[in-house]
């Protein structure tokens, strides 16, 4: 299994939301819906405040509870990778995956009624390109690559910087990392 | 040939009845049509007609589903004393209980179908032509156990009734293994339904080992409550004799189950509230409200109050023996568990979301109308099954009547076999008595 990972530097992220716009453009996400979003987390008390911007999306977990939960196999791993996709033609819209997802990463497509989500832009990855959000980021705070390769940029960043992932305690083994 | 006649006679009996019977059937059909009309609307416009959202993705439908699986599982409370302990009084009620299980499972499945945004794609669940994600997906498990339970609860009464129809004693050795299977299966359907929720590690409100036991305990309250009321209706409107012993036993089971259920609720409340962690956010929202949002507070406190009043009535012996008080306790307990296991369990699991947002949920009118339609279908299925079952148990329909029709066209003039024993003998005696009465007049 090839482990693709995204590493996002919260120190250089300015919270512009370009990742959200580029995703909507690239993947033709209908207006009003989005596959990724930016969280502004504020810590501390006034006047000693710090703000952390986090561009969040599906974590393409190595142990994806949504893939387990799906009764028809519509939620699946793309080829031999950790990229989680939904086959719209097979999705009954039972919403078991939404209940199973710890990241709120799944959305109901209206009016078609299937579940949609971030695909790590696998159609671009296939051609050796970065996902749309990563390639658009104006501060280059987002990085995408293969975690198994120790020479890849994501591996080097994770070995040299402090990092965290979101809710690893659920056992999902998420693959989006935040440097801080 | 006998089988076809059996089905024909059964169906004919379902279409035979007085003004009250037809009034009830048409009332249910009207409600079904009412729900069906709104369901067409949901199919046309999509799930936007419901109050559900990306954040609260299961609502009133799944709440009813979880509750109804419990009703179905509770039939086991009649099956065990009837077939394992050979209680004669309960053996007379057991087929009605199994009919209720069939109706409840069908209604539960209906609620899942209306909750699914694309029912046209459900064929993907069929193995071979689709990919049935078994045994990974808990929903796939639920499909297996619910359909298996449906088949078992159709097959066993079908065999027993078919034997009675042919004036034969059902072969106990033949169907006993299936009865044992059905007993374990009943527990499994509700456990799997609980696991459907408790498997989600990101939803701390559900992610507790207590959920399975709690589901079983509360099912053994709501199930008997409905059966007790139904048996009284059967006793009131048909000639079928239901022994008070059956109702007494069910009331006792209900009492104990409600005590256990309330104990579980208390244990849950203590664990979450004594040292409140972030995992308690959902239960805090449910009971006390969170950040100014408290849509479910009235629901859960109502449920708790109803359950406490019900258990108080049930625990006082003279009140439990009194049919009026028992019925009050049944209705209160039934509604209390319906809220506790439905709106009070399914919805708060989604609030707040794992991201910490609060999106509240309230069912829309469309959702309520469709739910009413589903319940009406459930009542309709049960009414029809019970009608035919009672007629066969009373001996009104027999294959012998058909064969003897040429010689003795009168209804109820069947051949009475010498080997008829137990419950079936009682049925023959009652029809015999009815005949004697008819002859006098």
Image (cartoon, helix red, strand yellow):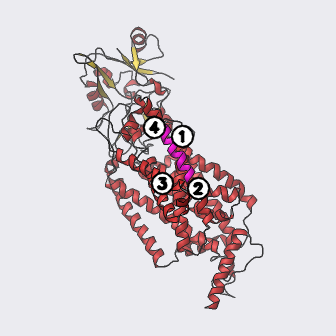
In-image side of A132 versus A74 (left or right): left
Picture layout, residue A28 above or below residue B329: above
- Frontmost of labels 3 and 1 is 3
Chain holding disc 1: B
Dot 3 falls on a residue whose secondary structure is: helix
CA distance separating discs 2 and 4: 26 Å
**Circle 4 is placed at which residue position?**
B269
Chain holding disc 3: B
Chain holding disc 4: B
In what quadrant of the picture does the C terminus of chain B appear? bottom right
**Circle 1 is placed at which residue position?**
B133
Which mark identifies residue B252? 2
From this viewpoint, is residue B166 visible?
A: no
CA distance separating discs 2 and 1: 41 Å
Query: Can you name the residue that lies furthest to the top here?
Result: A160
In-image side of A172 versus A48 (left or right): right
């Amino acid at each position: 299994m090839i482990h693709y990972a995204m590493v996002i530097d919260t120190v250089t992220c300015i919270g512009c939301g370009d990742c959200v716009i580029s995703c909507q453009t690239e993947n033709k996400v209908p207006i009003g819906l989005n596959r990724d979003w930016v969280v502004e987390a504020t810590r501390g008390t006034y006047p000693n405040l710090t703000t952390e911007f986090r561009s969040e999306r599906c974590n393409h977990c190595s142990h994806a509870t949504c893939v387990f939960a799906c009764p028809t196999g519509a939620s699946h791993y793309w080829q031999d990778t950790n990229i989680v996709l939904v086959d719209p033609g097979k999705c009954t819209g039972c919403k078991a995956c939404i209940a199973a997802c710890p990241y709120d990463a799944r959305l109901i497509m209206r009016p078609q009624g299937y579940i949609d989500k971030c695909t790590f832009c696998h159609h671009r990855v296939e051609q050796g390109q970065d996902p749309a959000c990563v390639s658009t980021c104006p501060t280059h705070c987002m990085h995408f690559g293969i975690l198994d390769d120790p020479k890849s940029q994501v591996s080097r960043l994770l070995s040299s910087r402090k990092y965290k992932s979101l809710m690893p305690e659920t056992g999902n083994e998420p693959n989006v990392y935040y440097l801080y | 040939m006998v089988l076809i006649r059996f089905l024909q006679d059964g169906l004919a009996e379902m279409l035979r009845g007085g003004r009250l019977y037809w009034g009830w059937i048409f009332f249910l059909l009207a409600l079904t049509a009412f729900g069906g009309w709104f369901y067409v609307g949901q199919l046309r416009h999509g799930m936007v007609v419901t109050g559900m959202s990306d954040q609260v993705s299961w609502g009133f439908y799944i709440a009813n589903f979880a509750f109804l699986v419990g009703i179905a599982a509770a039939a086991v409370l009649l099956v065990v004393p009837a077939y394992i302990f050979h209680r004669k009084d309960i053996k007379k009620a057991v087929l009605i209980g199994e009919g209720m299980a069939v109706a409840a499972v069908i209604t539960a499945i209906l609620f899942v179908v209306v909750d699914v945004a694309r029912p046209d794609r459900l064929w993907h669940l069929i193995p071979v032509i689709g990919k049935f994600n078994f045994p990974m997906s808990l929903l796939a498990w639920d499909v297996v156990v619910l359909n298996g339970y449906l088949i078992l609860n159709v097959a066993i009464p079908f065999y027993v009734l078919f034997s009675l129809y042919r004036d034969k004693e059902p072969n106990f050795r033949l169907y006993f293994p299936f009865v044992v299977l059905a007993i374990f299966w009943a527990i499994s359907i509700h456990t799997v339904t609980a696991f459907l929720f408790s498997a989600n590690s990101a939803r701390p409100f559900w992610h507790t080992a207590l959920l399975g036991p709690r589901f079983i305990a509360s099912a053994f309250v709501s199930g008997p409550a409905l059966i007790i009321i139904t048996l009284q209706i059967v006793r009131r409107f048909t000639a079928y004799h239901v022994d008070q012993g059956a109702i007494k036993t069910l009331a006792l089971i209900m009492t104990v189950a409600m005590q256990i259920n309330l104990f579980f609720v208390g244990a849950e409340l203590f664990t979450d509230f004594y040292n409140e962690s972030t995992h308690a956010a959902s239960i805090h929202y449910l009971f006390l409200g969170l950040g100014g949002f408290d849509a479910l507070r009235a629901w859960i406190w109502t449920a708790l109050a109803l359950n406490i009043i019900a258990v108080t009535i049930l625990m006082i012996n003279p009140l439990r023996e009194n049919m009026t008080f028992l019925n009050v306790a049944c209705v209160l307990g039934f509604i209390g568990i319906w809220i506790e296991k439905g709106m009070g369990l399914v919805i708060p699991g989604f609030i707040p979301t794992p991201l910490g947002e609060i999106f509240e949920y309230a069912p829309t009118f469309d959702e309520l109308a469709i739910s009413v339609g589903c319940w009406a279908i459930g009542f309709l299925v049960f009414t029809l099954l019970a009608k035919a079952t009672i007629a066969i148990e009373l001996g009104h329909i027999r294959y012998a009547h058909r064969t003897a029709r040429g010689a003795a066209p009168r209804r109820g003039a069947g051949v009475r076999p010498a080997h008829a024993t137990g419950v079936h003998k009682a049925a023959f005696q009652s029809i015999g008595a009815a005949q004697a009465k008819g002859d006098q007049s």
